[in-house]
Image (spheres, rainbow, N blue to C red):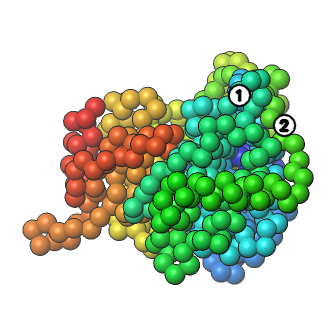
Amino acid sequence: MQRVKVPGGALTGDQWRGLAEIVRRFTPDTPLHLTTRQDLEIHDLSDVQVPAVQHRLATLGLTSVGACGDTLRNLTVCPCSGVRAGCPDLLPLAQQIRRELEAYRGIFSLPRKFKISLSACREGCAKPWINDLAFVAQRRGGAWGFRAIVAGSLGARPATGVELTDFLEACDAAPLALAAVRLFEAHGDRSNRAKARLRHVRERLGDEAFLAMLRDELAKVKSERNWPVALLREPAEPFEAHASLGLPNGDLLPDAADELGALADDPRLRIRVGLDHRVAVFARDERTLREAIARPALALPAEQRAVILACPGTRWCSRALVETNALAERIRRELGSRLPAGAMVCVSGCPNGCAHTAVADFGLSGVATTRDGQRIEAFNLLTGGGRGRTAALAQPAESKLTGDEVLRAIAARL
């Protein structure tokens, strides 16, 4: 598998078409796959195909370096950034942060992965509370800055982050990112990967001591050199008409990628890969938007009231305990019209909860159990999460449910 970083969720038309070409040539029976961090994955590659795929990605200006492993992962930026009114363009800042951190000597040998998100709206649609470091844009006294949230992560024992400050000047965002990485490199646990994220440092030190240490490190970083001014600009001509194309189980066929490439070429539109198996399409008016998404290959990724996510499960993941996609499809088919608009249902194939089960409205975590002496696939149900936009974790509701029981349990709560 090759995981391809898509900075800020923005691809050019040529990049969309190039990805479609790669799939047709190398994995014709396997679609592109969207992740929950604005990455695209190419699965079912053989070892001998990987160098050719990496070379083609490089010619497209794309890379898989840093998309996996104990390093800085793809920086996520909410799709509305620089597109909708009141949402400043955060992609230049994200690129500045990426360059600063990739130049740091220890960035490719951190204790564990390090995730950063930037939200351009107060709603926090880049899920700030489940990242190692997150910035939520807000205006104060006529200037843009950020609410800074630190040391959150998911996994089998998830914990959302804590607020470092309710207003950070924009010019301090990159220094804070470097300070957080330096603190993590120095104090992260390298002996136990289950407790090796930045939030485990916070839990070991205690919130107050951790935040004080991070503030001290930020002061050191800022004193070491002059940092460039970060200017956050709102769009002069916003794109207010909006549609979300839902891709069941995150799968994107090459014909649909070609169509998205054509949309990306259209100056009247903006296309962004989301963080929830959806692609956002923006236009300046509803007519242009509806004409754009009426293309034949985009007919299947129709708009959905609810967000129904599923990790790959046993289809591709060696850690998965259960198959996930079939249950997600049943939820779409049988409950999709009843789920509240914007509700998030997340189906994960194991307790690690990679589909963001721990912060979902309805989270499902795969488990193996036995009934009548037979091993069966089952799910634990959690409810009431804040979708990563708030600090709320989903709470256990029912355990070891079959697929039929899951449908009934969710239906009973609607």
Q: Quadrant of residue 368?
A: bottom left
> Percent position (x, y) of residue 301?
55, 39
- 197 left or right of 88 in image: left
The residue under the point 58% across, 54% down is 211
> Percent position (x, y) of residue 247?
54, 45
Give the residue type that dot 1 points to: Arg
> Percent position (x, y) of residue 263?
74, 36
**Could you tell me how far apart the alpha carbons at marks 1 and 2 are, in whole angstroms?**
13 Å
> Percent position (x, y) of residue 344?
43, 40
Asked if residue 46 is positioned above or below residue 178 in the image, the reply reads below
Secondary structure beneath disc 1?
strand
**Sequence-earlier tag: 1 or 2:** 1
The residue under the point 67% across, 53% down is 215
Instruction: Answer yes or no: is residue 400 visible.
Output: yes
Which quarter of the rendering shows the C terminus? Answer: top left
Q: Which residue is mark 1?
A: 139
Q: Which mark is residue 250?
A: none
Secondary structure beneath disc 2?
loop
Marks 1 & 2, CB-CB < 8 Å contact? no
Q: Which residue is mark 2?
A: 231
Asked if residue 44 is positioned above or below residue 287 in the image, the reply reads below
The residue under the point 22% across, 43% down is 409
- 266 left or right of 49 in image: right
Q: Quadrant of residue 352?
A: bottom left
Q: Nearer the viewer, residue 113 or 186?
A: 186
